[in-house]
Structures are given as C-alpha cells and as structure tokens.
Image: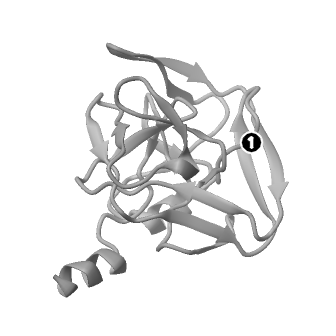
C-alpha cells in the first residue's frame, strides 16, 4: 500500500505529532492533544465536537509523509485536502478506503488548496501547490487524526482544510452503544 500503517483505533490517523489543529475561538493545539469535548473548527466555521475516540495509527514499516511547498512534511498521502475542485489526496484510492462515500481525486502540483487566514470571521485563501516535500518516517512512529461525536466532516490541520478521514461509525462506537 502507499501508506503502510496499522490502526490502533480503527483507522484514519494521518498527521504527525505537532500538527496544529484549529479550535473554535481561534485557539490551536497539537493534534495529538485533542480529546473528548474539544470544539474543533470545521471549514464552514462550525463546531465539530471531538468524540471520546482516540485516533492514532502506528506505522508498521517505513513510510513516506508529505509537506506542501516550503512546509515540513506532516501528512500521509492518503489524507484528503479541500481544493477549489473538490477533495483530493496524493493517494486517493487509500483515502476512499477510509471513507468510501467521499469522492476523492488525485492531488498534484498546480492544485489549489484552501488554508485558513482568519477565524473571526472565518476566511480562507487558496494556496497553489508548487511542490511536495517528502521524508521517510521509521516504523513505529504514531500518526494522529480526529473523530467527531456530532458528525462534522472537516477540520484545519496546519491551517489547511482537510477531511475527517475516519469512519463515523466504528466498532468501538457500536460496542459502546450496545453496552448502554
């Protein structure tokens, strides 16, 4: 597979430790620090309430991660970014494995992605991808993502609008529901 990882929580962790996650009110936290009840800023400016599920994956072998333009590499190629042409990922076939109902096409140089410039009021700019940086992470590294309790579909990672690339209904959520 293009991105080799084994989920510790059901799938979807696509960002390295230290990736900034934008919360409601203009605050940011590192993605690995998000927890139940955090109000995450969606691309529509609404609140996505983080669930009690921790989204983390452990890389099972050395894996390439990517950055955009002059940014250090911070994401797996399977993660969808919002462009002016819709959702795109470097490896769209793997993005759609996580969320088969989301149409994802190929993210490439020349595409324009949305990046947050202001939270009050919410405002984005289009950033043209001139190149991708790439580095190899060693097996055993942990990647992070988020999961909403209230069904949000996007968030901002290092300012970029990205999709929630984690199934809304997971085995863990079903088991908790059955236990109640």
Identify which residue, 32 or 154, lies in the foreground: 32
Identified at 67% across, 63% down, the residue is 142
Q: Which quarter of the picture shows residue 7?
A: bottom right
**CA neighbours of label 1 inside 10 A, class few (<14), some (14 to 19), many (20+):** many
Q: Could you tell me residue 21's position as x and y percent?
A: 50, 38
Q: How is the image coloured?
A: one colour
Left or right relative to 58: residue 45: left
Q: Where's residue 171, x and y in %? A: 34, 80
Q: Residue at x 57, y 52 (%)?
A: 32
Q: Is residue 97 left or right of residue 71?
A: left
Asked whether residue 119 is in view, the answer is yes
Q: Is residue 79 above or below residue 44?
A: below
Residue that numbered label 1 is attached to: 73
What is the residue that sits farthest to the left in this orientation? 180
The quadrant of the rendering that contains the N terminus is: bottom right
In this view, 12 is above or below 38: below
Which one is in front, 6 or 53? 53
Q: Nearer the viewer, residue 33 or 130?
A: 33
- Residue at (66% x, 43% y) in the render: 18
Quadrant of residue 146 in the image? bottom left
Q: Which residue: 78% across, 73% down?
A: 61
Q: Is residue 1 visible?
A: no
Q: Quadrant of the C terminus?
A: bottom left
Q: Is residue 178 depicted above or below 7 in this figure?
A: below
Instruction: Indicate the secondary structure of the residue bearing disc 1.
Output: loop
Closer to the camera in the image, 47 or 99: 47
- The answer to which quarter of the image holds residue 158 is top right
Total number of numbered labels?
1
List x then y, in percent, for residue 160.
52, 32
């Amino acid at each position: 597979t293009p991105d080799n990882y084994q989920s510790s929580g059901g799938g979807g962790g696509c960002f390295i430790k230290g990736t900034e996650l934008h919360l409601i009110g203009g605050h940011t936290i590192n993605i690995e620090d998000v927890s139940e009840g955090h109000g995450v800023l969606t691309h529509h400016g609404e609140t996505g309430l983080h669930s009690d599920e921790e989204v983390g994956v452990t890389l099972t072998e050395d894996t390439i991660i990517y950055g955009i333009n002059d940014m250090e590499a911070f994401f797996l190629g399977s993660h969808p970014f919002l462009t002016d042409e819709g959702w795109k990922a470097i490896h769209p076939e793997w993005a759609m494995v996580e969320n088969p109902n989301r149409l994802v096409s190929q993210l490439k140089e020349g595409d324009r992605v949305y990046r947050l410039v202001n939270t009050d009021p919410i405002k984005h700019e289009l950033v043209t991808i001139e190149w991708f940086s790439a580095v190899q992470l060693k097996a055993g590294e942990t990647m992070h993502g988020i999961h909403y309790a209230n069904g949000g579909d996007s968030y901002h990672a290092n300012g970029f609008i990205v999709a929630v690339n984690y199934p809304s209904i997971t085995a863990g959520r079903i088991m908790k529901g059955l236990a109640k």
